Amino acid sequence: MEQKRQKFSAKLPDGYCIYHHNEELAGIYYRKSENRKFARGEDQSLEFSPEPSNKNDPNAVRIMGVFKDKKGTEIKLHIGYIKKDRARVLVGTGAIKKMLPRLTKIMEYSHGGISISFQIIGPSSELKDYQQASSLPVFKEKITQKSKKSQKPKRTPEPKEKSGCLTIVKWVFIAYLVMGVMGAILQAIF
């Protein structure tokens, strides 16, 4: 399988360090044409764009691919999202306001697939505060369902019977009721 790989090593801005290594874009599959244009462009970079009005996830953070086309015109396309668990921490701690994406790799495969890797960088002076905040239990939980709207209400399971005796007692009671009703009907008829 033939593939084209581009690696990037942009210098870290002064006072910044890497908070998260080797992040992958989420939702890349749904934006194939945008990602193909981005991968084939020149001078590629990434930008974060929080999306608090997103109906599925108010913590969603769009990733915008910025590049120049062959004419030198700068183009900005929505190419994916930060993964849900990571976005929840970045938005929930407020750190997203100071974070930057740092493009590290674009892989374009012969079958048409594309993968884009990046780092999340932020102010060196705030790394420890971010690490402490992101280790809080509320951020440790993995998100497993698409959204609160799509969650089905939990059904309380009915208690299981401990033995067959209870089942027999139920059937005897039902039989007794049926016989009583039948007896009353027969008396009314005759």
Image (cartoon, rainbow, N blue to C red):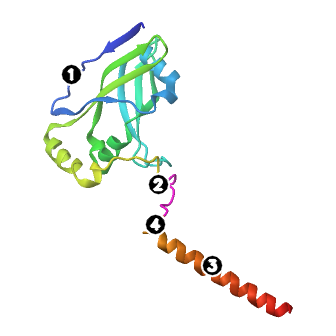
Q: What residue lies at 36% left-to-right and 27% top-to-bottom?
A: 46
Picture quadrant where residue 50 is located? top left
Mark 2: secondary structure: loop
Distance CA(mark 2)–CA(mark 3): 43 Å
Identify the mark nearer the N-term, 3 or 4.
Answer: 4
Mark 3: secondary structure: helix
Identify the mark nearer the N-term, 4 or 2.
Answer: 2
**Nearer to us: label 1 or label 3:** 3
Label 2, on which residue? 148
Mark 4: secondary structure: loop
Is 22 magenta? The answer is no
Query: Which region of the structure is painted magenta?
Result: 148-155
Identify the mark nearer the N-term, 2 or 3.
Answer: 2
* The C terminus - image quarter: bottom right
Q: What residue lies at 36% left-to-right and 18% top-to-bottom?
A: 106
Distance CA(mark 3)–CA(mark 4): 19 Å
Label 4, on which residue? 160
Q: How many other residues sit within 10 Å of disc 3, few (<14), some (14-19) or many (≥20)?
A: few
**Amino acid at circle 2:** Lys
| Residue 69 versus residue 16 in the image, above or below | above
Query: Visible in this render: residue 36?
Result: yes
| Residue 89 versus residue 71 in the image, above or below | below
Identify the mark nearer the N-term, 2 or 1.
Answer: 1
Label 3, on which residue? 174
User: For residue 11, which numbered disc appears in the image?
Assistant: 1
Judging depth in this view, the residue of 81 and 171 nearest the camera is: 171
Identify the mark nearer the N-term, 1 or 4.
Answer: 1
